[in-house]
Structures are given as structure tokens and as C-alpha cells.
Amino acid sequence: MHKSYFHGSATNAFLRLSTIAGVLGLSSIGQAWAHARPETQSPVAGAVVSAPHEVRITYNEALEPAFSSLVVSNAQGKQVNGAKAEVDATTHKTMRVALPILPSGEYQVKWVAVADDGHRTQGSYKFTVK
């Protein structure tokens, strides 16, 4: 009977440790598979604004500047930003691109965000200059 009691305690301890290890493993998987997603945009999607001086997007994850990009095009599909997008050197979460003076019309922002972990996301949205 003593041997059976010890075996049961060891089994319970093993199951508790296995459960804890599993929970910790699942939480780290969530972090390992994180993707950079926009948190704020300026101008925001669908906005009607006076000519902005830049487009700025802040992400929930740090970006890899060498592989991330931000391009603004006019209604005819012609890229209007001459400068390359820059990623904030302090937080690595904000990407911005300077714009020339934009005439009235609709513009499309296309972004590619590569997180520090190497995962790539992309998207686009439009805004209008009045």
C-alpha cells in the first residue's frame, strides 16, 4: 500500500509539472508567432485631410527597418513619396515617410512590416486630400 501511495503522489506531481510546462509552452508560442499590426495611422484610413507632410504608422511590435516599407501612391498608381520610409530608431515601432505637397485627390498607402522575429505582414488603406 505504501508503494502505491508513493506512485500516486509521483504521478500527480508529474501531471502538475506537465500541465505547467504545457501552459508555459503555449504562452511562448503566442509570442514567437507574433506579427506586427498597425495600432495608429496618420492620416487614418478614409480620412479627408489637408495635405499631410508625412504618413506615419505605429505598430504593436518592433520592426526590422531593412525589410519594412511604406509607399504612398496617387489615384493613377504613381508613387508620390520620393524618400524611403524610416523606422524610429528608439522604439522601432513607428514607420514614417515624408511627403511632398500633395494636390487634392485620393491616395493609397501600402505598407509592409517585418517584425524583429521575421514575420511579415502587409496592408493598405486610402485617404483623401481636400
Image (tube, rainbow, N blue to C red):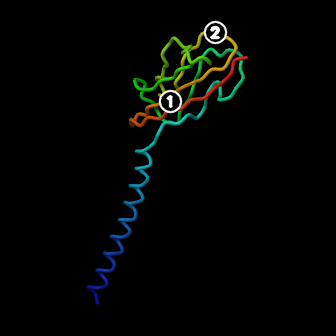
Q: Position of residue 17 (x, y in %)?
A: 36, 65
Quarter containing the N terminus? bottom left
Q: Position of residue 58 (x, y in %)?
A: 55, 30
Which image quadrant is residue 119 in?
Answer: top left
Q: Judge by depth and name the residue closer to the eye, 84 or 91.
A: 84
SS label for mark 2: loop
Which residue is at a point 53% across and 36% down the rendered structure image?
37
Q: Residue furthest top?
A: 101
Quarter containing the C terminus? top right
Q: Is residue 102 above or below residue 114?
A: above
Q: Circle 1 sits on which residue?
A: 93
Q: Circle 2 sits on which residue?
A: 101
Q: Judge by depth and name the residue closer to the eye, 124 or 4.
A: 124
Q: Label 2: how many residues lie within 10 Å, few (<14), some (14-19) or many (20+)?
A: few
User: How many numbered callouts?
Assistant: 2
SS label for mark 1: loop
Drawn side of residue 28 relative to residue 44, left or right:
left
Check residue 11 in the rendering and tell me which mark sits there, or answer none.
none
Q: Is residue 19 above or below residue 4?
A: above
Q: Position of residue 40 (x, y in %)?
A: 60, 31
Q: Judge by depth and name the residue closer to the eye, 52 or 58.
A: 52
Q: Earlier in the sequence, mark 1 or mark 2?
A: 1
Mark 1 belongs to which amino acid?
Answer: Lys
Mark 2 belongs to which amino acid?
Answer: Ile
Drawn side of residue 3 relative to residue 69, left or right:
left
Which residue is at a point 66% across and 20% down the rendered structure image?
106
Which residue is at a point 71% across and 16% down the rendered structure image?
50
Which image quadrant is residue 19 in?
Answer: bottom left
